[in-house]
Amino acid sequence: MSGNIDPSVLTARERRDMSEMLNIIKTRRSVRNFSGKKLKSADIAKVLEAGRWAPSGLNNQPWRFGVIENEGLRNRIAVFTRYGSIIRRAAAVIVVCMDVADSYNRDKDLMAVGASIQNMLLEAWDLGIGTCWMGEILNKKTGVADALTLDKDLDLLAVVAMGYPAGKPQKGCRKTLKNLLIKGTKYP
Ligand SMILES: Cc1cc2nc3c(=O)[nH]c(=O)nc-3n(C[C@H](O)[C@H](O)[C@H](O)COP(=O)(O)O)c2cc1C
């Protein structure tokens, strides 16, 4: 990130012009307030494309996506999480499931779906779209599955709320690398 420029005043594309992938990764924040403006279908397609190109064990691609823009349906799933207001305010949500029929190792498949979700968050951010990865809703995954009449092979793993950000997201913070290194290892 060069010098004195505040990344929060730039669009994601502008941020990209001045930097590279690490900058997109570091400036992405969870967005919980949205402008109410509808998303472009072409942009939603790009987000899904990013999810589709995630790595997976044996390249089994266990992720499945459901895009919900319809307000009535969003409201019906919003009741299953204490963070439902984020789903109600979003322009769309992507329901992310693992197809257990395509799963060969639950640990690895969960990681692959996580990679797919992160790809989508980053592509969205690069397009100027805010997202919030929502996991608390998994406490009531049966309710969501019923509301969406999900096939029995689809295990709900996340709901990603999306929309154009309204206001400034909170500041990011992370543990230092020193605190993340495994005991007995050293870097640099
Ligand atoms: C697995 C997972 C589950 C999450 N669940 C929720 C959630 O239910 N509600 C919510 O508001 N944020 C949720 N988050 C977003 C985190 O709170 C957020 O990523 C974290 O605080 C770091 O902030 P940042 O994304 O802005 O860097 C979740 C994130 C992950 C990866």
Image (spheres, rainbow, N blue to C red):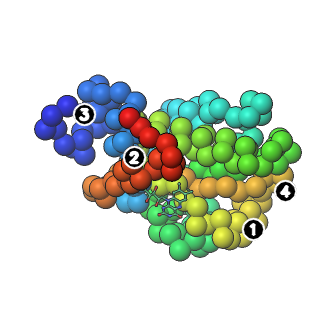
Label 4 to label 1, Cα distance in Å? 10 Å
Identify the residue under disc 2. Answer: 177
Give the crowd class for mark 3: few <14, some 14-19, many >=20 residues within 10 Å: some
First-in-chain label (4 vs 1)? 1
Name which residue lies at 62% across and 30% down: 53
- Element under disc 3: loop
Label 2 close to label 3 by CB (< 8 Å) = no
The secondary element bearing badge 2 is classed as: helix
Say whether marks 4 and 2 touch (CB < 8 Å): no
Residue 184 placement, left or right of 138: left
Tell me if residue 22 comes above or below residue 71 in the rendering: above
Q: Which mark sits nearer the N-terminus, 3 or 4?
A: 3
- Looking at the rendered structure, the secondary structure element under dot 1 is helix
Q: Which residue is pictured at 83% across the width and 42% down the height?
A: 104
Horizontal side, residue 81 vs residue 174: left or right: right
Mark 3 sits on what residue? 1
Hey, which residue is sitting farthest front in the picture?
A: 184
Helix, strand or loop at mark 4: loop
Query: What residue sits right under mark 1 in the picture?
Result: 142
Earlier residue among tags 2 and 1:
1
Closer to us: 72 or 167? 167
> How far is disc 2 from disc 3 in space, using C-alphas?
19 Å
At label 2, the amino acid type is: Leu
Going by the numbered disc 1, the residue's amino acid type is: Thr
